[in-house]
Amino acid sequence: MFEMIHALRQLPDARNRIFALQDFRSLLPGHGEGAGKSVVTRLERRGELTRVCRSIYMLPDSNLRGSDLLGHVAARLRAGQLNYLSLETVLSEAGVISQIPLSRITLMSSGRSNVISCRAYGDIEFVHTNKKASTIAADLTYDARYQLWRASVALALQDMKATRRNTGLVNWEAAHEFV
């Protein structure tokens, strides 16, 4: 257990990292899946690891907080799928809607729609889309802060309409500056 925590702390930028349960397998080569999970559970109980949500952990002295943390978790949870920040998250940060979603980020995803609770840290809402990366690539930029792709305001507005979300809070005058 102590060797694993020592190895994690030695990783470059360890305080800005999120670890998935499968990441620990390489640090516990002699342990089976069940034994590896019990080591992680013991480390969590001892306060050496903090569980963020199902199978996602971080070091307790992590620098990640708020929506930055949620972005990193979302990127790890669905690493094999197209995911991009959109909807209320993008529109709020651009000033197009007046309300700021607290402790929640919204993403469009090629995976199924789902809300993942990260307990005290907030929620991640994945909303399914059939859009292909090749058709929306011009409207996406990489956001290193979140480690995710980010929709343009125009694409976020299209996503709001396509998913039939409430557009009553949209300041259309401000939105036209971006479209």
Image (tube, rainbow, N blue to C red):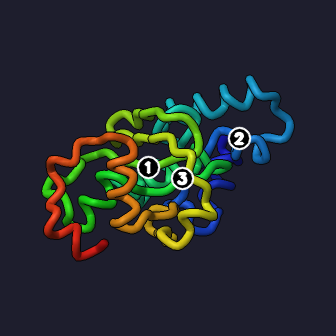
Q: Nearer the viewer, residue 141 or 55?
A: 141
Q: How many marks?
A: 3
Between discs 1 and 3, the one toward the N terminus:
3
Q: Residue at x 54, y 42 (%)?
A: 57
Residue beneath label 1, please? 107
Task: Judge left or right: residue 10 versus residue 74.
Answer: right
In the image, farthest residue toward the right: 30
What crowding class fits label 1: few (fewer than 14 Cα within 10 Å), some (14-19), or many (20 or more)?
many
Say whether marks 1 and 3 touch (CB < 8 Å).
yes
Does residue 48 appear in this view?
no
Quadrant including the N terminus: top right
Task: Judge left or right: residue 169 versus residue 112.
Answer: left
Residue 25 in picture, x, y percent from top left: 76, 41
Q: Amino acid at mark 2?
A: Gln
At mark 3, the secondary structure is: strand
What crowding class fits label 3: few (fewer than 14 Cα within 10 Å), some (14-19), or many (20 or more)?
many
Q: Nearer the viewer, residue 141 or 178?
A: 178
Disc 2 versus disc 1: nearer the observer: 1
Q: Amino acid at mark 1?
A: Leu
Q: Could you say which disc has been placed on residue 22 in the image?
A: 2
Q: Residue at x 79, y 46 (%)?
A: 26
Residue 125 in picture, x, y percent from top left: 41, 40
Q: Nearer the viewer, residue 13 or 157?
A: 157
Residue 37 in picture, x, y percent from top left: 67, 29
Q: Residue at x 62, y 68 (%)?
A: 12
At mark 2, the secondary structure is: helix
Q: Quadrant of residue 97?
A: bottom left
